[in-house]
Amino acid sequence: MTGSFGLIRTPRIYFGAGESRKLPGVLRSQGSNILVITGGRSFLDNKGVTDLMSLLDQEKFTLYHERIGNEPSPEDVDMLASRYRNLELQAVVAIGGGSVMDTGKAVSAMLPLESSVREYLEGVGAKSHPGVKRFFVAIPTTSGTGSETTANAVLSGSDTRGGFKRSLRHENLVPDIALVDPVLTVGCPRYTTAASGMDAFTQLMESYLSLKSGPLTDSLALDGIRHIHHNLVEACNDGQNLGAREGMAYAALLSGITLANAGLGLIHGFASSLGAIFDIPHGVICGTMMGTVNRFNIRALLDKKIRDKSTEKYVCLGKIFSGREDKEYDWYMRFVADYLDELTNELGLARLGEYHVQSTDLEKIASATDHKANPVIFEREQLVEMLRARM
């Protein structure tokens, strides 16, 4: 039986090499006053992006250009929304990585409103966003967060309780158009490719293993996982390989769809609690914790000695990663843990201590870490043990 499931709306997606050049035609139906948000240094280093900006100039759009070189804060979003609220913008275009996507999505959502975005952040503000926004186009230049297909924007800030990473969320905030052009990712540096790729990998695996997953998200997640398996290392080692870049862009796109519908697990719980306190790139946290968390999951499932749904899913992953069909179920599960550890080492992902996380911080981090959709629920002491293993 298939069972019941739902699916959150997705953008109108254009995927493939050169598809970003559809941008002028996409915008022409909206108007001529356009806010474009890009990254900082990455904008200057990416010829595909500068060519795209030149194309918009040639089409006689009135362009306003803002850059953001950090994970967006509520103050960043409020400043940009205030600056452009009365300029009769017809569209917002975000061209960049996950932080740029989140900034553009949040600014688009706050331009029609007068209040601060803080008032609408989950767990911070008391208001629900009404779902109004300016026409929003998302054009990713990294293959990681899948934000081009999601309905939330993650903002980082602080309040009286300390640091936070919280979402502005409404189903209507899904981008109107996603132009996913692998050519724009070709110039992405190796380490960024590795960290963002591991973010997408984590999102696909966690949504596949999530207790809230369903048959549709499972099929999409497995397709994305296969593309990660075949393309991530090659994209890191040969950034000019357009085939590998295309495979990673496709996997990241799918990861946004699956996480939005199936949720995530413990690794992203750590990413939220760690990212609220320490200035660690989101993809680095996901990548560095991936092998350790999955090893703990697998060990706990094997200790139960029951072949439940989560066990069967790990077996399926073990068959994909190993390419073998002749082993016992426990061999496949252990293979997954070893495979992820080896991948983490091969990609050279940093440990937490390199970002000044100390042993005295681990209890606080564990206390703030949520993992309700994870296939295994752990005690705080076990969460601390996982963190210590990646110090």
Image: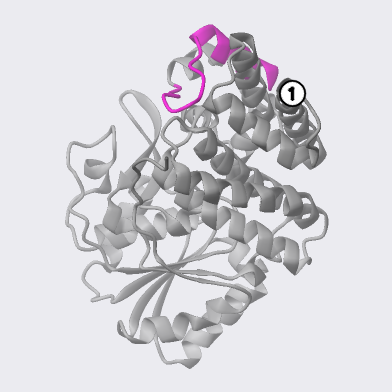
Q: Residue furthest front?
A: 1
User: Residue at horizontal 66%, vertical 71%?
Assistant: 183
Say left or right for 316 vs 379.
Answer: right
From the image, which quarter does the N terminus lie in?
top left
Place residue 386 in its image quadrant: top right
Number of labels in the image equals 1
Badge 1, how many Cα within 10 Å: few under 14, some, many 20+?
some
Place residue 240 in its image quadrant: bottom right
Residue for badge 1: 334
In the rendered image, residue 128, in percent from the top left (x then y), is placed at 19, 44
Height in image: 50 above or below 85? below
Say left or right for 87 vs 277.
Answer: left
Place residue 287 in its image quadrant: top right
User: Residue at horizontal 23%, vertical 76%?
Assistant: 88
Say left or right for 284 vs 279.
Answer: right
Does any portion of residue 80 appear in the rendered image?
Answer: no
Height in image: 314 above or below 150? above
In the rendered image, residue 249, in percent from the top left (x then y), is placed at 61, 60
Secondary structure type for disc 1: helix
Does any portion of residue 203 appear in the rendered image?
Answer: yes
User: Residue at horizontal 59%, vertical 32%?
Assistant: 313
Q: Which residues are magenta?
A: 369-391
Magenta stretch holds residue 224? no
Height in image: 51 above or below 133? below
User: Residue at horizontal 40%, vertical 45%?
Assistant: 261
> Could you tell me the amino acid type at mark 1?
Arg
From the image, which quarter does the C terminus lie in?
top right
* Nearest the eye: 254 or 17: 254
In the rendered image, residue 349, in percent from the top left (x then y), is placed at 73, 37
